[in-house]
Image (cartoon, rainbow, N blue to C red):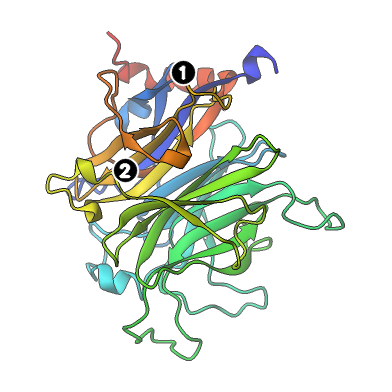
């Protein structure tokens, strides 16, 4: 690697809780140098990306780079809660948008206009009976397709929260249906390459907001961790793990690592008071005792992201105690990407007005 391509700095995409200001738009913060504990708002704290399509509200953004093409993608939920149809959360789980809102960029500065990806649409043009599509994230799988697959083997394996009804229940009347986490695959977040996979998480009650990360094992394998919000059984945010190579397949065995994650940030200790987890690694981790993994948990309804840390994912998460930590108030559900030095140096001037070090 050259100095320009060395890992340096981080980018956070998110939305903001502001019922009066219609803040269901995409905001971005950049780390203060290579420090993942201090964050500077880009664009003077104003939205960077907005949507005039679908519901016009965008929430729960995720950001990821295709390692083969270098293209960046921001993927967001198409849902406007503030100033929308006022239907309420029950209706929004049954009769809301099944579109994801997608932007793409080659340089993190210039972004395409938003477009839609309907995760309910099948290749033949028919549709699954999904009630909504929330909080989509993904991991890149370099060998997802078989070797003979035309166009390469790599793909993004996506996972998002939906209610899924029987094909005959076109009105979505079944009140026993609950939120599960579904999965699919794509190479570029277009309808042409999207393939619906099936159910990824079904814990017998509402499960939402899955975020995932992987770490290499000494034997050359990979351990995959998924962190999900349980809204049914009192577990709050939980994390489980697997060493399965094809971790998205339905017969995969997962091992519980921790539950009630982040409950210590809730005034009454209720584990249901946190959601929207976002996990990322210090990009200087080398498998040693000083490795750092970070998890933001969204303290609802309006406090926003608070930090957790782990030095060993198999031992779970603890509250980050750091006087150096700073993130703007009311920052909510989003995702973090590792940058190169060249990418960081392109973005850092956009946060100049928000420099906190003075």
Q: Position of residue 343 (x, y in %)?
A: 56, 23
Residue situated in front as seen by the camera: 243 or 326: 243
Residue situated in front as seen by the camera: 245 or 87: 245
- Badge nearest the viewer, 2 or 1: 2
Identify which residue is drawn at 37% across, 32% down: 309
Q: Tell me the number on the disc at residue 276.
A: none
Q: Is residue 16 visible?
A: no
Whole-number angstrom distance, CA of label 2 to CA of label 1:
21 Å
Left or right: where does residue 35 sit relative to residue 81?
Answer: right
Q: Which residue is mark 1?
A: 34
Q: Position of residue 242 (x, y in %)?
A: 56, 52
Q: Is residue 120 visible?
A: yes
Identify which residue is drawn at 81% across, 58% down: 146
Q: Tell me the crowding category of disc 2: few under 14, some 14 to 19, or many 20 or more residues within 10 angstroms, Cα based.
A: many
Identify which residue is drawn at 42% across, 62% down: 54
Q: Position of residue 300 (x, y in %)?
A: 22, 49
Q: Position of residue 99 (x, y in %)?
A: 48, 63
Q: Tell me the crowding category of disc 1: few under 14, some 14 to 19, or many 20 or more residues within 10 angstroms, Cα based.
A: some
Position above or below: 119 against 48? below
Position above or below: 44 against 279? above
Quadrant where the C terminus is found in the figure:
top left
Left or right: where does residue 193 sit relative to residue 167?
Answer: right
Q: In which quadrant of the rendered view does residue 335 lie? A: top left
Q: Tell me the number on the disc at residue 297.
A: 2
Q: In which quadrant of the rendered view does residue 205 lie? A: bottom left
Position above or below: 102 against 163? above
Q: Residue furthest left?
A: 268
Identify which residue is drawn at 37% across, 16% down: 352
Residue situated in front as seen by the camera: 235 or 123: 235
Position above or below: 357 against 139? above
Element on which disc 1 rests? loop
Do tag 2 and tag 1 residues touch (Cβ < 8 Å)?
Answer: no
């Amino acid at each position: 690697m050259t100095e320009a391509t060395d890992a340096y700095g981080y980018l956070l995409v998110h939305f903001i809780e502001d019922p009066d200001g219609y803040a269901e738009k995409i905001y971005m913060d950049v780390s203060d140098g290579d420090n993942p504990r201090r964050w500077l708002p880009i664009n003077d704290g104003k939205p960077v990306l907005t949507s005039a399509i679908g519901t016009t509200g965008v929430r729960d953004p995720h950001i990821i780079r295709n390692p083969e093409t270098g293209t960046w993608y921001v993927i967001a939920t198409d849902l406007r809660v503030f100033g929308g149809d006022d239907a309420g959360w029950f209706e929004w789980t049954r009769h809301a948008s099944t579109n994801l809102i997608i932007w793409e960029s080659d340089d993190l500065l210039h972004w395409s206009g938003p477009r839609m990806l309907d995760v309910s649409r099948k290749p033949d043009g028919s549709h699954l009976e999904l009630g909504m599509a929330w909080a989509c994230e993904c991991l890149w799988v370099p060998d997802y397709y078989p070797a003979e697959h035309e166009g390469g083997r790599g793909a993004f394996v996506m996972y998002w929260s939906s209610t899924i009804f029987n094909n005959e229940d076109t009105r979505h009347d079944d009140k026993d249906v609950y939120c599960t986490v579904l999965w699919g695959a794509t190479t570029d977040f277009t309808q042409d390459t999207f393939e619906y996979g099936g159910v990824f998480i079904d814990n017998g009650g509402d499960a939402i907001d899955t975020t995932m990360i992987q770490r290499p094992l000494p034997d050359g394998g990979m351990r995959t961790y998924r962190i999900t919000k349980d809204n049914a059984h009192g577990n709050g945010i939980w994390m489980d793990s697997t060493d399965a190579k094809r971790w998205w397949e339905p017969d995969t065995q997962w091992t519980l690592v921790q539950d009630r994650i982040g409950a210590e940030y809730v005034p009454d200790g209720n584990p249901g008071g946190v959601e929207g987890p976002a996990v990322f690694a210090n990009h200087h981790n080398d498998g040693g005792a000083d490795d750092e993994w970070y998890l933001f948990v969204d303290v609802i309804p309006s406090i926003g992201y608070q930090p957790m840390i782990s030095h060993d994912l198999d031992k779970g998460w603890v509250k980050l105690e750091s006087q150096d930590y700073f993130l703007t108030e009311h920052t909510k559900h989003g995702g973090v990407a590792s940058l190169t030095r060249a990418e960081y140096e392109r973005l850092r001037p956009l946060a100049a007005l928000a420099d906190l070090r003075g």
